[in-house]
Image (cartoon, helix red, strand yellow):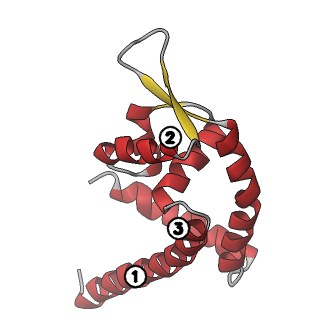
Amino acid sequence: MSSESVSQSLKLFIVLSRAYKAIDEQVSKFIQANGLNPTEFAVLELLYHKGKQPLQQIGNKILLASGSITYVVDKLEQKELLVRAACPDDRRVTYAQITEKGKSFIESIFPEHEQNIHQLMSHLTEEEKETAIHLLKKLGLSVRKY
């Protein structure tokens, strides 16, 4: 392992981190301007696209520590954007389910959210996006082996 190789790995890490931070800040601004924090939006978007979810599984799906899920669900429930629903087959399981108000909210802002992300990614050609997707998946999957 040469020092040049190590240096290049560190540079890649820094560039990747900075790119993610810059994009995430822009996306977060839009979400916060619409009255939610990014985690609340992620939970609501998950429920909108995937339907009701067991509270215990939401954290894994949106990359959030399980201890924070209760707090986020409480906040969304207070805003009447989701409800908790008991599982009829297993009393240990509680689902989070989006409400009609939550659906309306997501439907009102999601198209602009999509366009904002598209605009942020528009500096890459379609071919560059495909290459980036492929390489980042490869990197992410290889890291999971450790």
Q: Secondary structure at mark 3?
A: helix
Residue at (34, 53) in percent of width and height = 144
Mark closer to the chain start, 2 or 3: 2
Mark closer to the chain start, 3 or 1: 1
Residue 135: give its label.
Answer: 3
Q: Which amino acid, mark 2?
A: Glu
Q: Is residue 66 above or below residue 113?
A: above
Q: Which amino acid, mark 3?
A: Leu
Q: Residues within 10 Å of mark 3 (few under 14, many from 20)?
A: few
**Could you tell me residue 38's position as x and y percent?**
50, 61
In the picture, the quarter occupied by the N terminus is bottom left
Residue 24: give its label.
Answer: none
Q: Is residue 82 above or below residue 94?
A: below
Q: Is residue 5 left or right of residue 105?
A: left
In the picture, the quarter occupied by the C terminus is bottom left
Q: Which amino acid, mark 1?
A: Leu
**Could you tell me residue 113's position as x and y percent?**
68, 65
Q: Is residue 73 above or below residue 132?
A: above
Q: Is residue 17 above or below residue 102?
A: below
**Could you tell me residue 104's position as x and y percent?**
73, 47
Q: Which numbered disc, 2 or 3, marks the residue closer to the eye? A: 2
Residue 12: give its label.
Answer: 1
Q: Is residue 70 left or right of residue 52?
A: left
Residue at (48, 27) in percent of width and height = 95
Q: Which residue is mark 2?
A: 77
